[in-house]
Amino acid sequence: MLRDITLGQYYQTESILHRLDPRTKILASFFYMLSLFLFTNVYVYVLALAMLLLMIELSHVPFKFIIRGMKAIVVLLIITAVFNLFLTKGTTFVSFWKFTITEEGLRNAGFMSLRLIFLILGSSIMTLTTSPNQLTDGLERVFGFLKIFKVPVHELAMMMSIALRFIPILVDETDKIMKAQLARCADFESKNIFKKAKSFIPVLVPLFVSAFRRAGDLAMAMEARCYQGGQGRTKMKPLKYKGRDILTYLVFVLYLAGIFVCGILLPKLLPIY
Amino acid sequence: MSVKDCILIADHLTYVYGSGTERVVKAVDDVSFMIHPGEMIGLIGHTGSGKSTLIQHLNGLLAPSEGSVYYHGKDIHDNGFDRKTFRSKVGLVFQYPEHQLFEETVHKDVMFGPKNMGLSAKEADLRAYEALKMVGLEDEYFYQSPFDLSGGQKRKVAIAGVLAMRPEVLILDEPTAGLDPKGRDEILGLVKSFKEKQNMSIILVSHSMEDVAEYVDRIMVMDNGKLVYDDVPEKVFAQYKHLEEMGLRAPEMTYITDELRKQVFPSLPVVTTLQEAKEAILGTFLLDSGVSL
């Protein structure tokens, strides 16, 4: 019943992007996103697209699978495009009834949509090639500097990885409880919204009870192994930068340099949009 | 017994997990059998042999990929078949059923099923009371929170929750999992009493032969989604070598009498329970020594 839901974006396969250090991927994605906001012209976007295609090719994740992530933002995309298209002031491009489309509006709508698409695709390449555990590991290190400001970085990362770990378990549990209540003639398909909401009480109560039971058990097990937070804790697989990570950083430095060239120099030499 | 008077028929059931993907698993593979009134059946198989998937077909929670299930001669997946009422007739008690409890009091929780069937509050109340009596829960617990009970008591309440719908067939998936020996005997004894008092048909799902041997009059053995044996316990346990290959074991008594047969009494029959073993050994012993009773 609920098993069809794919939670977590990770796509397991073999590729250089999968093997990269999560920190590299997090920072690279950050720089990539940054690059999209620095300049707005055709050259920059062509370069960004080239980079994106290169990463998609390297990730070995089927293109279909990557595109699937776009479904969630289709509505947002349309709204953004429509608002930019009709509400930007400037020289009139076409005009009908009460609506006016300006040249600037057209340009804004186009770039905004592209920016959104690149943003989502760029970040989904990171989540598709990084397992949730690696991701939390990476985040913990990347944001490690916040410890100076007394932010409990390790604890937050631990909470995140536990939450991720428990999603499939709770999905399974929900499935089981729903079936058990169905066997007692429960009806989850009522058209009436209030009745429908009420019909989920027999699922939610046992689900919460079991979530608390599991949380208690886990806390006990962690206590029994003397877990006491991040202080002085070592790792079984510590994150270590390899040659390929340095290479990636170099590629991204070059990419950012390229963005600046495309953003500042090229428009002066060959001015279009 | 004939096809006519049987309650449920499983006709060439096949269930495939993950069809259309790379990993296709046949959890149930061409399984057919009949269930008659008042029968007590043990469904046995190793973990992952497909027994839990199979029983979910019997009350319509899962629809078979191929094949059909008939209830009193009607296909349960036909359009217009009232599956909700049907589910009250084939009661399914899942593994660790105590995890489904949710109401404020034991009594209210047991009323959940009857109420869903559309019965009046009074009738539901009556049935809940009757079901709680049937599982032998002491009156003092009826109006307590189910979450305050012990594990064994919770399980009884959960079973009562299904019994309150007055099913014709009661299916219990590993009803003794996680219970101590005393709780185990208590639950199995209860189940047997349902059969005797209400003429309910019962399917007991288990991976333990010992559990089942003493109580059932027919055993179905599943392996890899296929129904391998469907016979009286003695005949199934006589195949204990094959059972071992499937990761199962015959009851201890079968092994003991088997050794005795090899070494002392060649004429000893296959037995499954302690009581039977006692009678068989005594009988053969007396016969061999020429004493007649």
Image (cartoon, coloured by chain):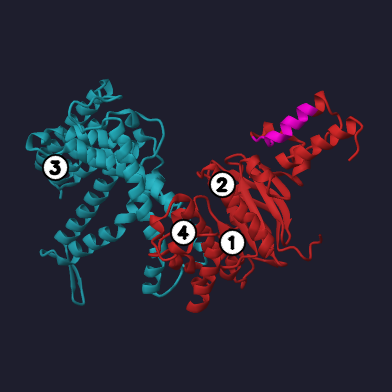
* Front position in the image: A13 or A42: A13
Q: Which amino acid, by three-letter code, is at mark 1?
A: Gly
Residue on which disc 3 sits: A270
Residue on which disc 4 sits: A178
Q: Quadrant of residue A141?
A: top left
Mark 1 vs mark 4: give the one in front.
1
Q: Which amino acid, by three-letter code, is at mark 3?
A: Leu
Q: Quadrant of residue A123?
A: top left
- Chain B as rendered: colour: red
Q: Quadrant of residue B35?
A: bottom right
Horizontal side of A139 relative to B170 (left or right) equals left
Q: Is residue B111 visible?
A: yes
Q: Residue at x 51, y 56 (%)?
A: B156
Q: Which amino acid, by three-letter code, is at mark 4?
A: Met
Residue A272, position as x, y percentages in the image: 15, 48
Question: Which subunit holds the residue at mark 2?
Answer: B
Horizontal side of B145 relative to B38 (left or right) equals left
